[in-house]
Image (tube, rainbow, N blue to C red):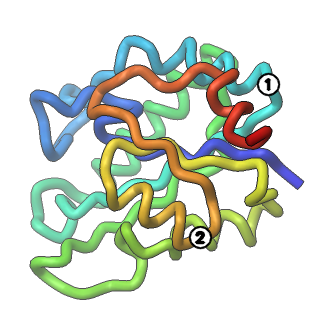
Amino acid sequence: MKKVIFLDRDGVINDSKDYYYVKNENEFHLNTHIIGSLQEYRDAGYEFIIITNQGGVAKGLYTFETLENIHQNLKNTLKKEGIEILEIYFCPHHNKISNCICRKPNPLMIEKAVSRFDIDKESSVFIGDSQTDIQSANGAGIKGILINENGKLPKIQEIIKIFTN
């Protein structure tokens, strides 16, 4: 079984202070600490999955193609640093436009990943910057870690400590 760190995208992986909706590749900027943190987690045996709401698709602010390009560029950038992303799950819906079962805080995207990748929920965590991330994690039976928007990710020792308490 895989140990996975689930990550929210906007505000965790990329800087969200200037763009609530990242509408193109030029607006997507990695948070300065992210690569070092992911390398640390990787070295401790964790793999990575991104879980993100992308309601800008439903609002017509960007297309599926643009979103896929942003995600492919993210994967390529991280791969150059020795970091592999197993998958990026995203919800393209917006609750003000339509109801869906995949949008966080619903746990469906996490549950799909757990099933597909044979993930050990007992040794996996979700790092997010909002209560909806934590609710989604809890709903899927995964421990959630709340960080500040664009804040530093916890050190690996802090994550390991969660499982020893």
Q: Which quarter shows the C terminus?
A: top right
Q: Residue furthest right?
A: 1
Q: Secondary structure at mark 2?
A: loop
For mark 1, what is the residue? 44
Which residue occupies 14% across, 29% down?
Answer: 17
Figure check: 84 above or below 102:
above
Q: Residue at x 29, y 23 (%)?
A: 29
Residue 52 shown left or right of residue 144 in the figure: left
| Residue marked by disc 2 | 140
Amino acid bearing label 2:
Ala
Which of the 4 image quadrants contains residue 56?
Answer: bottom left
Seen from the viewer's position, the closer of residues 67 and 158 is 158
Q: Quadrant of the N terminus?
A: bottom right
Residue 60 in the image: x percent, y percent? 11, 64
Q: Nearer the viewer, residue 11 or 60?
A: 11
Task: Identify the residue shown where x is 37% and y is 67%.
Answer: 104
Q: Secondary structure at mark 1?
A: loop
Horizontally, residue 128 falls left or right of residue 67, namely: right
User: Is 87 positioned to the left or the right of 74 in the image?
Assistant: right
| In the foreground, 106 or 122 | 122
Pick whichever of labels 2 and 1 is earlier in the sequence. Answer: 1
Q: Calculate the distance from the C-alpha at mark 2 to the C-alpha at mark 1.
A: 23 Å
* Three-letter amino acid code at the position of disc 1: Ala
35 sits to left or right of 163: left
Q: Which mark is residue 1?
A: none
| Dot 2 alpha-carbon crowd within 10 angstroms: few under 14, some 14 to 19, many 20 or more | some
Residue 55's place in the image compared with 149, above or below, is: below
Quadrant assignment, res 12: top left
- Write down the quadrant of residue 111 in the picture: bottom right
